[in-house]
């Protein structure tokens, strides 16, 4: 484990993904899962990550209510995982070591586009799980505006793939949101909060054994793991320079198991206007909840 200085690096803002095409009928994206190296703290060497479009977190996907969005998720990852895979778990014993499938968390979609854990696929779709049925997922977006997120969902290794970096925002908008005159553009900021631990060489640390260790099983799944540093948008303890005005923060806990108690300066008026299911029902009486 390493000790890192807080508030040394600015907060990164994930870019918005551009579609391959958009017309009156549909919007089509191609999203690749790739291995890359990324600087997660200026005191660390570049860290190996797995990211959508080779970045951690992945790019933001923006959609409108009732917009038909098609996404072809592509696996361009290596055959071997760089984190410890427990081969005694269901789904990991006989299949390939690196498998991925994407789940859009909170979205109302048909089962074949929901990222079922056994609908996994490997690099170039060479091997697929028993429930794999399509390469292109269909998202009808027939729900109210909400802060959603996409992440890996493969059976037996979800914890490892998400820890490696496979997560990103999916922002769904509607006409009600447009009428509310909320902060937008550079004043609307997604915040993906996750915990990690690092080895001295900058690589991600994930335990290969629980405490106490499991005799004869190495590596073995741990009952839970909480990292010793907090990252926001893929940067360790970042800072954000702000103007004296209103901001809209979309806060997401993307950690494997850790929960957070988020606090703000009591002198600042903070209002919760929604959850991952959409806007709060009493929009005319939003209250500060911090």
Image (tube, grey):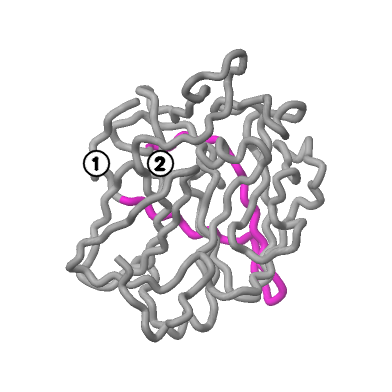
Residue under the point 21% across and 68% down? 268
Q: What is the x, y in percent for residue 196?
A: 41, 37
Based on the picture, tell me whether residue 4 belongs to the magenta stretch: no
Q: Front-most of 88 and 42? A: 88
Q: Which of the 4 quarters of the picture holds residue 179?
A: bottom left
Per the image, the residue denoted by label 1 is 6
- Magenta segment range? 11-39
Q: Give the vertical position of 13 relative to 282 (above or below).
A: above
Say few, some or many: other residues with alpha carbon within 10 Å of mark 1 (under 14 / 14 to 19 / 20 or more): few
Q: Which of the 4 quarters of the picture holds residue 22?
A: bottom right
Q: Describe the element under mark 2 as helix, strand or loop.
A: strand
Residue at the far top in the pictured view: 216
Residue at the far left in the pictured view: 267
Residue under the point 67% across and 62% down? 28
Per the image, the residue denoted by label 2 is 195
Q: What is the x, y in percent for residue 74?
A: 67, 45
Q: Is residue 51 left or right of residue 198?
A: right
Q: Is residue 150 left or right of residue 288?
A: right
Closer to the eye: label 1 or 2: 2
Residue under the point 58% across and 49% down? 151
Q: Is residue 269 left or right of residue 185?
A: left
Q: Describe the element under mark 1 as helix, strand or loop.
A: loop
Q: Give the vertical position of 205 relative to 119 (above or below).
A: above
What is the total number of numbered labels drawn onto the structure image? 2
Q: What is the x, y in percent for residue 78?
A: 63, 30
Q: What is the x, y in percent for residue 144?
A: 57, 75
Q: Which of the 4 quarters of the picture holds residue 64?
A: bottom right
Q: Front-most of 236 and 16? A: 236
Quadrant the N terminus occupies: top left
């Amino acid at each position: 484990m390493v000790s890192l200085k807080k508030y040394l690096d600015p907060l990164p803002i994930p870019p918005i993904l551009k579609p391959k095409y958009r017309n009156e009928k549909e919007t089509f994206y191609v999203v690749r899962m790739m291995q890359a190296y990324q600087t997660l703290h200026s005191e660390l060497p570049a860290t190996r990550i797995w990211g959508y479009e080779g970045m951690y977190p992945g790019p933001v996907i923006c959609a409108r209510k009732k917009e038909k969005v098609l996404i072809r998720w592509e696996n361009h990852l290596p055959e071997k995982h760089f984190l410890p895979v427990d081969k005694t778990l269901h789904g990991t014993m006989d299949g390939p070591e690196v498998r991925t499938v994407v789940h859009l968390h909170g979205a109302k979609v048909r089962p074949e586009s929901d990222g079922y854990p056994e609908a996994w696929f490997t690099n170039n779709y060479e091997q697929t799980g028993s429930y794999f049925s399509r390469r292109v997922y269909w998202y009808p977006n027939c729900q109210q505006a909400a802060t959603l997120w996409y992440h890996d969902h493969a059976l037996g290794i979800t914890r490892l793939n998400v820890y490696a970096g496979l997560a990103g925002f999916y922002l769904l908008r509607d006409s009600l949101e447009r009428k509310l005159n909320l902060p937008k553009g550079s004043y609307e900021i997604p915040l993906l909060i996750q915990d990690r631990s690092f080895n001295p060489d900058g690589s991600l640390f994930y335990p290969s054994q629980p405490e106490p260790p499991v005799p004869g099983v190495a590596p073995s799944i741990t009952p839970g793991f909480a990292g010793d540093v907090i990252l926001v948008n893929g940067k360790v303890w970042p800072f954000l320079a702000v103007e004296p005005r209103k901001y809209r923060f979309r806060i997401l806990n993307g950690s494997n198991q850790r929960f957070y108690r988020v606090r703000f300066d009591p002198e600042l008026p903070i209002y919760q206007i929604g959850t991952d299911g959409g806007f709060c029902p009493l929009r005319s009486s939003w209250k500060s909840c911090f």
